[in-house]
Image: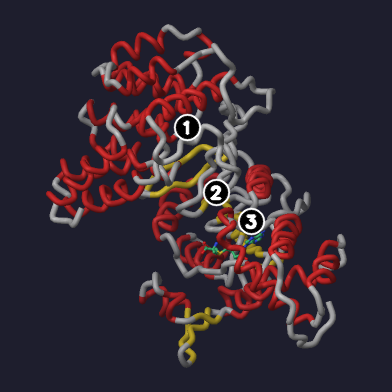
Amino acid sequence: MGSGGARVSASLSLEHVERLRALVAARLGLHFEDDKLESLRDALRARLEESGVSDAETYLARLALPGSARAELQRLAARLTVGETYFFRHPDHFRAFEEAVLPGLLASRAGARRLRLLSAGCASGEEPYSLAIALDRLLPDRTSWQVEVVAIDVNPDALEAARKGEYSEWSLRETDAETRARYFRRSGRAYELDPALRETVTFEERNLKDADAAFWRPGAFDVIFCRNVTMYLEPAVTRAAIARFGRALGPGGHLFLGYAETLRGISSEFHLCHTHETFYYRMRALDEPRPEPRIEPEPHAEPAPWLPEPDASWVEAIQRSSDRIATLVTAPPDSGARAGPAPAGRWNLHEPLDLLRQERFGAALESVRALPDAARDDPDALLLQGVLLVNTGQVKEAERVSARVLAADELNAGAHYVMALCRERAGDLAGAADHDRTAAYLDAGFAMPHFHLGLLAQRRGDAAGARRALETALTLFSREDAARILLFGGGFSREALAGLCRARIQALGGRG
Ligand SMILES: C[S@@+](CC[C@H](N)C(=O)[O-])C[C@H]1O[C@@H](n2cnc3c(N)ncnc32)[C@H](O)[C@@H]1O
């Protein structure tokens, strides 16, 4: 796009920035929230100055021409992507990879003696090189295996740094002394990666948005690491990329996402694995039943009409909660309906929800059981039943109902939480904590599992752990969905739950 250093004198309008946002979403697949518009404005200003294009109109028009702006898109990608990474980031993932995934993989690939790993969104290379180091350390008889680590990223500058293989002390902050000594050489203040290891990783510039049947061919990879990447993508791009990962992995293939990323509402092709205090996914076998995908409202969509205002009255909250659940319940699979007012008079949950609020759990249970069969069997209605069963002490029945929900949708955070309550009542505190952690992982805004984890930790005598979990719960309660407080809060209000948290934190020596 030309060259030079023209100053951008005219100020950039919001419309220019919005157009850049739309182009960046369409051409690069990157998603920018409203609170990131300033960084788009800065990028636009910088690119105008660097490329010598005199005005935003011309620049945006050129960027919109299909196929004509590849070099400019690369420059924009370099400017707009977040490249934060380091060696052995999320060490639990590497432990799970080494101890839970690799042994099975080595056994199943013992015949072909071939392994292919992909680091998707590899940034400056720390992740794929960490995988290469792990394989080098762990593969018995390494030379008789054909191992490939492929690493892709949309940012050409990051890939250039990756190929160079020179790192700072900061990049090695999770790398032990033995690994440093074995795989790196000190060169002034930098650490140079062993050239032999460097050669085992292939870097490629590639956008996860783009389909390429040859690259994503069936069975192309055994394991994919795509961590801390989907959080920056348009939801539709994430869905398409995950579908490609599934095909390229094939049955039994493994997928690692970042700690704050889940497949909830994105794909039901994968089974959630929970081990080494972390989570990853395994592609289901061909004959494994797939749950009906439940499409979640997109996180940055307009607020759904059923979302209560923070100060909504109970009546309003119940109305909206009920509408929300009734909508989920009543929307036929092919209706395309997402959220909106419930069709009048059908499967009305006002009564059981209102009884739940009044802590009249038995009556609420009767009311929900009186729903027509189709409504009663919907996961949301089942979940309500599960909650009411726990609250009326019918723990075995509650567990059976939650297990039904999880059999249909193992990524249902609410059902994991009800299961946690059931396991606790059955005396299985470790099982309870596992379900709480799963619920908290699947839905990062869900306060109750953290609250419950805090209580469980306190029961175990782990004061520091209890305080941490309760502090997280306290923060989350302030913005927790009113519908969810109604369903899972045991009849307590937001303020009461926050008050309970504060009191416990203070009793545990914290500031509350
Ligand atoms: C925060 S880094 C994560 C690095 C590494 N996976 C980790 O977890 O440490 C995110 C990387 O994803 C890359 N990325 C973002 N959008 C992408 C896309 N559409 N296709 C390929 N890579 C992308 C960015 O360029 C950046 O290098």
Residue 425, horizontal then vertical, whole percent: 22, 27
Tell me the amino acid under the disc marked 3. Answer: His
Q: Which residue is drawn at 31% across and 11% down?
A: 363
Q: Name the residue under label 2.
A: 255
Residue under circle 3?
31
For marks 2 and 1 on the same chain, the one whose residue lies earlier in the sequence: 2
User: Label 2 vs label 3: CA separation?
Assistant: 22 Å
Distance of label 1 from label 3 (alpha carbons): 28 Å
| Residue located at (52% from left, 69% from top) | 84
* Ligand 1 closer than 8 Å to label 3 CB: no
Instruction: Select label 2 or label 1 by which is in front.
Output: 1
Q: In this view, does 43 lie to the left or right of 56?
A: left
Residue at image position (49%, 60%) is 139
Left of 388 or right of it: where is 246? Answer: right
Disc 1 target residue:
410
Residue 209: name its quadrant.
Answer: bottom right
Q: Residue at x 41, y 41 (%)?
A: 310
Identify residue type, mark 1.
Glu
Amino acid tagged 2: Leu
Q: Which of 418 and 42 is in front in this view?
A: 42
Ligand 1 lies in quarter: bottom right
Instruction: Report whether residue 55 is seen.
Output: yes
197 over 258 or under it: above or below: below
